[in-house]
Amino acid sequence: MGTPMIVLNGIQKRFDSVHVLKGVDYSVAGGSVSCLIGPSGSGKSTLLRCINGLQPADEGEVWVDGDLIGLRIEGDHLIPLSEKEVADQRRQIGMVFQRFNLFPHMTALENVMSGPLRVNRAQKAETRELARQLLDRVGLADRGDHYPNELSGGQQQRVAIARALAMKPKVMLFDEPTSALDPELVNEVLSVMRTLAAEGMTMIVVTHEMGFAREVADHVCFMDDGVIVEEGHPDAVLANPQTVRAREFLRKAANSDQQN
Amino acid sequence: MPSPPASWASSRAEASEPVSVTTGVRPRTRRPRKKSPWRYVAIAVILFMVLSLADVALTNPNFGWPVVGQYLFSAVILHGLLLTLELTAVVMIIGSVLGVLLAIMRTSSNEFVARGAWTYVWFFRGTPLLIQVIFWFNIAALFPEIELAVPFGPTLVGFDANALVTPWTAAVLALSLNEGAYMAEIVRGGLLGVDRGQYEAAQALGMRPNKVFRIIMPQAVRTIIPPTANQLVTTFKNTALVSVIGLADLLHSAQVVYALNYQTIPLLIVAAFWYLLLTSLLSYFQALLERKYSKGYAPRSRPQAKSEPAVPKEV
Ligand SMILES: Nc1ncnc2c1ncn2[C@@H]1O[C@H](COP(=O)(O)OP(=O)(O)OP(=O)(O)O)[C@@H](O)[C@H]1O
Ligand SMILES: [Mg+2]
């Protein structure tokens, strides 16, 4: 596999007394898709937020394409970057949220334009053209003038993906992108993500969609209680887990899949 | 499957028995529900009160309606009205800017800045506005000379306080500083009301703090507008307090006139008429603004009735 695009070294994170991440080492090769699975509260979302600095880690280092995120090295010390500098670093890291988080007062097209226009001060006409292309790519060319509340959940999530892509990020982080969707809308979002993966985007996907992980992921990580318990090729981790905790989790996941 | 309790099952069966749901057998027509007889009693009482008031207003000569008519559009009163409007506008603008600044300060990660803003709001909301107005007007008693100076160091510029603090500046100062405190709370409430996910989405796009603010503020404005319009109406009426420091606002102008002709009640009616007219107009514009800012919240047409099977393109 290629050179690592994302590297995490010994990431630790506490919220007051709760030790949420207890030393996570993790690396994702350029152009590969890594799925992060694990029970609720195991720290998956927190890990993603550490990667783009929304919630800076207490200990450890996050490297994205050779950049140390949120910190500056000065001799033997690591100095936190200013808010502005972290913001600039985030441009190369796209993020898609469980609850879409589209800007409700902007149309779909304006949402997609919002990143480049406000961040890069790009030319308006150019940005509009880019946004149109991106909406077309996610199958929503005819929905540009709609406000988020006039779109279905699946459509909103696809707009959110287009919005993140508008920054031309090097990596994309997905935090349970289909968990808030009605079952019949899940596929239209997964399909966009599949295309993106096929185009060679480096992706970390927190998901409960085991089918997607099996089919699309190059790498699967099972997280529990703030550490990565097991990781490897999806065929190995999903079909033949080595640890009790992973086996238990996957058995429950399979059961609930059958019920649906 | 656990079976439902027997009583529940049987009562359901009984209840559903006599109700015929067959349609098309006998057409049923709708008719309005009978109104309560108390409704007519209430109408009668209110009508009686309105008529009595009208009777009193028209037959009691002390209301002085001809005097009201004579002064309603007089130059003195209209000048006063203009000054009241100017004062309201200036105070609202300064107060809003101050309020936004204070609200941002309150959310600052710098504890010192946040507490400073909190203290400001605490002080100016906690003391009567009338005291603040009189205080600023008499600031010369406290500081005969107002100087710009380095603390414990040399004076840079000095002014005579009496010359600097005219009734107008005292009024603007007092009302604006007070307004800022109220606006700060309103703006803060609006900013806190915006979903955390909106901040995160903006940050995740790589927006710097000031750009994030530009995404969040329009959303906050939606919740800020109704209380701000309310505040505008309050401020408009509060300007009447400046009559105590002799600024020729609407109320003071009315007072000047009735000090000469002793027609107190008619001139108060004149002033009240203008206050009422303007507050009504403001309320109307408030409704318009609220509609404008609900864009993207209330569906423009209908919410998507059908979600198109828009299958994403395979690129
Ligand atoms: N801002 C916060 N303040 C305090 N505790 C937090 C915060 N964010 C997360 N936590 C705690 O950290 C733990 C891990 O949360 P996290 O959201 O990362 O889990 P998760 O694996 O994403 O779970 P889920 O599958 O439910 O999304 C939880 O116990 C949560 O309560
Ligand atoms: Mg989560």
Image: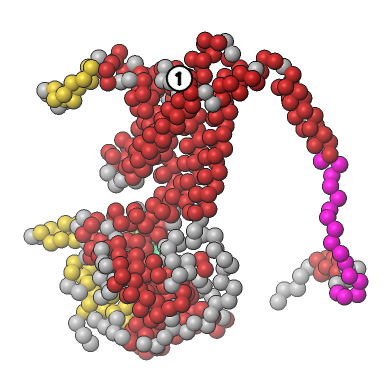
- Name the residue rendered at 18%, 69% in the picture: A67
Q: Is mark 1 within 8 Å of ligand 1?
A: no
Of B244 and A176, nearer the camera is B244
- Quadrant of the drawing holding the C terminus of chain A: bottom right
Q: Read off the residue under disc 1.
A: B243
Identify the main secondary structure in magenta.
loop
B21 w.r.t. B101: above or below: below
Between B130 and B43, the one nearer to me in the picture: B43
User: Which residue appears at 48% of the width and 69% of the height?
Assistant: A146
How far across and how far down the image is residue A222, in percent? 36, 77
State yes or no: residue A200 in magenta. Answer: no
Q: Position of residue B75 (x, y in %)?
A: 48, 23
Please tell me which residue is depicted at 40% across the width and 80% down the height of the picture: A136
Residue at point 47%, 46% (across, down): B225
Helix, strand or loop status at disc 1: helix
Q: Which residues are magenta?
A: B22-39
Q: Chain of mark 1?
A: B
Residue type at mark 1?
Ser
Q: Is residue A253 visible?
A: no
